[in-house]
Amino acid sequence: MNIQTRYIVSHLSKGVRLDGRKPDEHRKIEIEINPIEQSEGSARVRIGGTEVIAGVKLNAGVPFPDTPNEGVLIVNAEFSPVASPEFELGPPRENAIELARIVDRGIRESGCIDTKKLCIKEGEKVWMVMVDIQPLSHDGNLIDTAGIAAIAALLSAKMVKLEDDKVVYEKTDKKLPVNDIPVPVTFGLIDGKLVVDPSLEEEESMEGRLTITTNSEGNICAIQKGNACSLTLETIEEAAETAIRKGREIRALLKKSL
Amino acid sequence: MKRADGRKNDELRPVKMKVGVLKHADGSALVTIGKTMALAAVYGPRELNPRHMQESDRAILQCNYTMAPFSTKERVRPGPSRRSVEISKVTREALEPALFLKDFPRTTIDVYIVILQANAGTRTAGINAASLALADAGIQMRDLVASIAAGKIEGHYALDLTGDEEETTDCDLPVAYMPKERKFTLLQMDGNISKDDLKQIIRLAVKGCETLYEHQKKALLEKWSKEGFE
């Protein structure tokens, strides 16, 4: 155990975190809607010193053969070196791919996007909803910051025009059909204890990571364990309860910002 | 509930496991669960190149999950996909807690998983095979890692979903579990379930892992008792 980890662990045993938070407390969350006018919808989310912009672009494309009357959702993340000296140029690596897939699953499995309403012509043309995640500053817990930014961007997105089967990038008053607000809550596991919204220092010291995404009904729609750690059943059940409770708080904050 | 293949809710598909199936690998295993077939090969601990990747105080574990192009109805395009990159990562993180990497500084343990045929549960079959291949390579482990998915179909909890069942399920929850340690090393879920469902589904998956664990031990004994290994 290095000095930093020992320091974090000894504080945590007294129920204190280095920045003074309680184990189930997030850093300050700020949500700004539509900072990018060129996109169909966008959001800038800050959790403490971590900052992410998510943008939604629409396009018309061919549906998947097994869902000929449904629109397509694509979530992508690029970790640019602007956000962290640890990030390198080039195609997305393991961590960026995993983050995009965690955010994607939360949105997809919550069923929040009514993909049937995104059908233009069955089997031929549907709306493709592309959500791009751009971290601006990585100070811990990029997953939740990205997940909240992605759903906020989708909730703010407006449909664009379709003229003679061609997309014209002019926003209409019609909203993208989004009916739920899935919220990811990520935990760090440090010395067997759960902390919500791990900071960068905590991420460097934690043995495990667990992300649980919940919807408005308080149901769980996605889970992902990360890092080479092992979890007990009690830890998982405790995390699920906290994620439902914290998800409700963040959902209320999101609704207020829209 | 009646399942299409006549299984009970807590019943696995037919399981076959065999270790030492590859001549050149240090350890290997073939695991068949229903129509899903996973082959795993382990090399190492061996020298890690390039050297800048070496860790001075421990070995690193590298895992690669690949689906054979002919493993599914539609051909799988060769090369890494976003899905396979993620599965390789969670597989590594599922196996690493079972190993004592500090025993082998500056080396690598390489795990290669090839899905020869896919009918749901490929990542879990791959982890079962990889765990067996690591043991077959003679690498000390805290415990074998057993892995299976469970879900909820039309209101009923069900173990080890088939490809057809996966399409109608409310939830797909793959876990990897070290039965002796009673700890989870893989946990993923997509679907829409309540907190109580989660508890029940995890418990069902644990039961499945415990059964697979017995199969794993049997497969190891089958090879190594014959070769006179104590």
Image (cartoon, coloured by chain):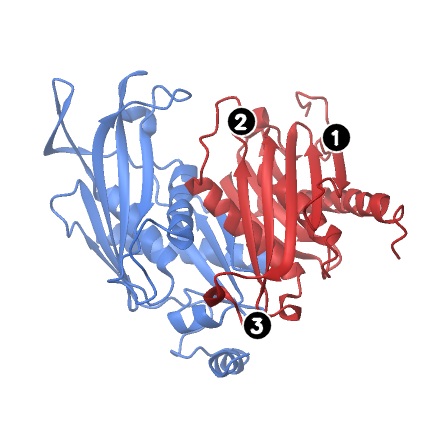
Chain colours: A blue, B red
* x, y percent for residue A224: 50, 51
Of labels 2 and 1, earlier in sequence is: 1
Residue A26: in sight, yes or no? yes
* x, y percent for residue A76: 32, 44
Name which residue lies at 30% across and 16% down.
A122
Q: Which residue is mark 3?
A: A191
SS type, badge 2: helix
For the residue marked with disc 1, what is the amino acid? Pro
Local packing at callout 2 (Cα closer than 10 Å; few below 14, some 14-19, many 20+) is few
For the residue marked with disc 3, what is the amino acid? Asp
For the residue marked with disc 2, what is the amino acid? Thr
Determine the image quadrant of residue B1: top right
Q: Chain of mark 3?
A: A
- Front-lying residue, A13 or B226: B226
Instruction: State the separation of the CA atoms marked 2 and 3.
Output: 39 Å
Q: Chain of mark 1?
A: B
- Placement of A194 over or under A45, stated as above or below: below
Q: Which mark is residue B76?
A: none
- Placement of B168 over or under A242, stated as above or below: above
* x, y percent for residue B102: 63, 70
Q: Which residue is mark 2?
A: B168
Name which residue lies at 72% across and 26% down.
B7
Q: Which residue is mark 1?
A: B14
